[in-house]
């Protein structure tokens, strides 16, 4: 079983992995990276892939750094790809119409993140 989430759903996918639910893989796209408060820092059993927009003002660098430190501490099998010039919501083609500051579609980041996700899930879920 794998979990994929976008934005808040990305946090949910990560939290399933953090709680060691019966997952082989968790993928987060421009998701919140905040760890679970007071979580037991046991090793994470699921493999984790995170796709982050480097220009995402909604997910600060401190959250990215905190996430990476948590993954190291919990000895997770993880990767985080940061896409240059990509803002929050970079996978949603129609998001520009909302006019929200710091939120925009990025075709290259969308394509690259999805290609990477498919390969990751094929490997981890043995498809």
Image (spheres, rainbow, N blue to C red):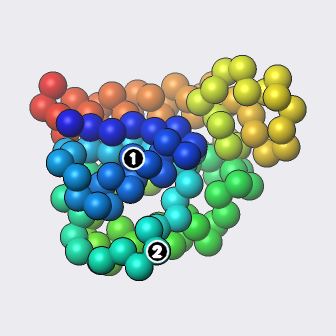
Give the residue drawn at x 33%, y 39%: 3
Task: Measuring from the top left, give residue 48's x and y in whole percent.
Answer: 32, 51
Task: Measuring from the top left, give residue 119's x and y in whole percent.
Answer: 29, 31
* Circle 1 SS class: helix
Give the residue drawn at x 61%, y 72%: 62
Work out which residue is located at the far left of the displayed protein and give it: 126
Left or right: residue 126 versus residue 21 is left
Q: Is residue 2 above or below residue 114?
A: below
Looking at the image, is mark 1 or mark 2 earlier in the sequence?
1
Left or right: residue 20 versus residue 108 is left
Between disc 1 and disc 2, the foreground one is 2
Give the residue drawn at x 86%, y 32%: 99
Report which residue position mark 2 lands on: 37
Report which residue position mark 1 lands on: 13
Figure quadrant of the N terminus: top left
Q: Would residue 73 be seen by someone viewing this image from the given angle?
A: yes
Task: Measuring from the top left, give residue 91's x and y in whole percent.
Answer: 59, 30
> Residue 69 sits in which quadrant?
bottom left
Q: Is residue 86 above or below residue 77?
A: above
């Amino acid at each position: 079983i794998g979990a994929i989430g976008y934005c808040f759903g990305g946090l949910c996918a990560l939290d399933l992995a953090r709680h060691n639910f019966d997952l082989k893989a968790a993928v987060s796209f421009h998701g919140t990276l905040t760890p679970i408060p007071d979580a037991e820092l046991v090793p994470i059993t699921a493999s984790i892939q995170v796709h982050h927009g480097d220009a995402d003002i909604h997910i600060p660098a401190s959250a990215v750094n905190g996430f990476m430190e948590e993954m190291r501490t919990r000895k997770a099998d993880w990767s985080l790809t940061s896409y240059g010039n990509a803002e929050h919501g970079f996978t949603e083609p129609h998001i520009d119409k909302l006019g929200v500051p710091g939120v925009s579609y990025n075709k290259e980041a969308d394509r690259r993140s999805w290609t990477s996700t498919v390969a990751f899930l094929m490997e981890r879920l043995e498809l």
